[in-house]
């Protein structure tokens, strides 16, 4: 008898929805391939939507948790909140809610942080960046502080909009996520 497959639910924005590239080449699809290659009994559900904010994530998360009953939830949201200059306190509250809902559903959580361009000012960008660490610390969840940590300064790995990573950046993002995700896979 085969063990039941467990799922990893990715709740993200355009970065996880593979904006501007083939969905099959995005980091989330590459994660599914990696799990198969390493013979780990997990499937990946990509519930990412371009333009999604943390408020939208809160609205969509509970039904997704009920439908997929994931073992792990990767929350990659907040970038659009920041780019729209939304209050950091509201974003933190939404991230808190998503982490709590995921944990109540029995899932382990990986929170994926983002950074903003400096033109938003040092106070806002600092508060924004710290929000992810604050939420992860408060809940004792795994944290990837910055999804673009290994290539953020390389313009050649971003599409012309300067926001969305190219296809060449997807394996780099996967490696960053994998380092934090692997310990959560039991």
Image (tube, rainbow, N blue to C red):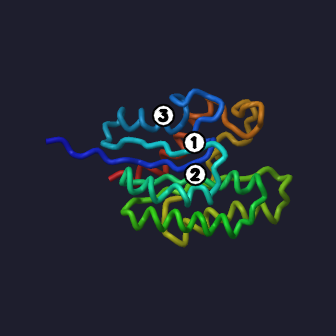
Q: Are marks 1 and 2 in contact (CB under 8 Å)?
A: yes
Horizontal arrangement in the rendering, residue 22 relative to residue 114 (left or right): left
Number of other residues with Cα within 10 Å of mark 2, as a class: few under 14, some 14 to 19, many 20 or more: many
Check disc 1 and report its element: helix, strand or loop. loop
Q: Is residue 179 above or below residue 145?
A: above
- For mark 1, what is the residue? 16
Label placed on residue 76: 2
Q: State the image coordinates of residue 61 (x, y, percent, origin top left).
A: 49, 57
Q: Is residue 127 above or below residue 146?
A: below
> At x 49% / y 64%, what residue is drawn?
141
> At x 32% / y 53%, what residue is drawn?
186
Number of other residues with Cα within 10 Å of mark 3, as a class: few under 14, some 14 to 19, many 20 or more: some
Distance between the Cα atoms at labels 1 and 3? 11 Å
**Looking at the image, is mark 1 or mark 3 nearer the viewer?**
1
Q: State the image coordinates of residue 83 (x, y, percent, origin top left).
A: 76, 52
Q: State the image coordinates of residue 95 (x, y, percent, origin top left).
A: 58, 63
Question: Which quadrant of the rendered structure holds the N terminus?
Answer: top left
Q: Quadrant of residue 161?
A: top right
- For mark 3, what is the residue? 30
Label placed on residue 158: none
**Towards the viewer: 129 or 70:** 70
Seen as rendered, the residue at the extreme bottom is: 138
Horizontal arrangement in the rendering, residue 5 relative to residue 104 (left or right): left
Distance between the Cα atoms at labels 1 and 2? 7 Å
**Towards the viewer: 94 or 180:** 94
Distance between the Cα atoms at labels 3 and 2? 16 Å
Q: Is residue 92 above or below residue 26?
A: below
Lower position in the chain sequence, tag 1 or tag 3: 1
Q: Are marks 3 and 2 in contact (CB under 8 Å)?
A: no
> At x 55% / y 45%, what residue is drawn?
48
> At x 70% / y 42%, what residue is drawn?
152
Check disc 2 and report its element: helix, strand or loop. strand
């Amino acid at each position: 008898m085969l063990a039941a497959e467990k799922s990893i639910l990715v709740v993200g924005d355009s970065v996880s929805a593979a904006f501007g590239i083939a969905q099959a080449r995005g980091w989330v699809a590459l994660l599914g391939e990696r799990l198969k290659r390493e013979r780990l009994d997990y499937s990946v559900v990509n519930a990412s939507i371009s333009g999604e904010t943390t408020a939208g994530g809160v609205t969509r998360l509970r039904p997704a948790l009920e439908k997929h009953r994931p073992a792990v939830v990767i929350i990659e949201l907040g970038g659009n909140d920041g780019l729209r200059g939304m209050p950091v306190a509201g974003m933190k509250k939404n991230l808190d809610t998503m982490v709590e809902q995921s944990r109540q559903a029995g899932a382990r959580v990986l929170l994926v942080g983002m950074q903003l361009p400096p033109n938003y000012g040092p106070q806002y960008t600092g508060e924004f960046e710290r929000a992810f660490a604050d939420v992860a610390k408060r809940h004792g969840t795994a944290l990837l502080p910055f999804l673009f940590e290994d290539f953020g300064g390389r313009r050649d790995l971003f599409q012309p909009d300067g926001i969305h990573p190219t296809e060449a950046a997807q394996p780099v993002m996967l490696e960053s996520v994998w380092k934090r995700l692997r310990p959560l896979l039991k």
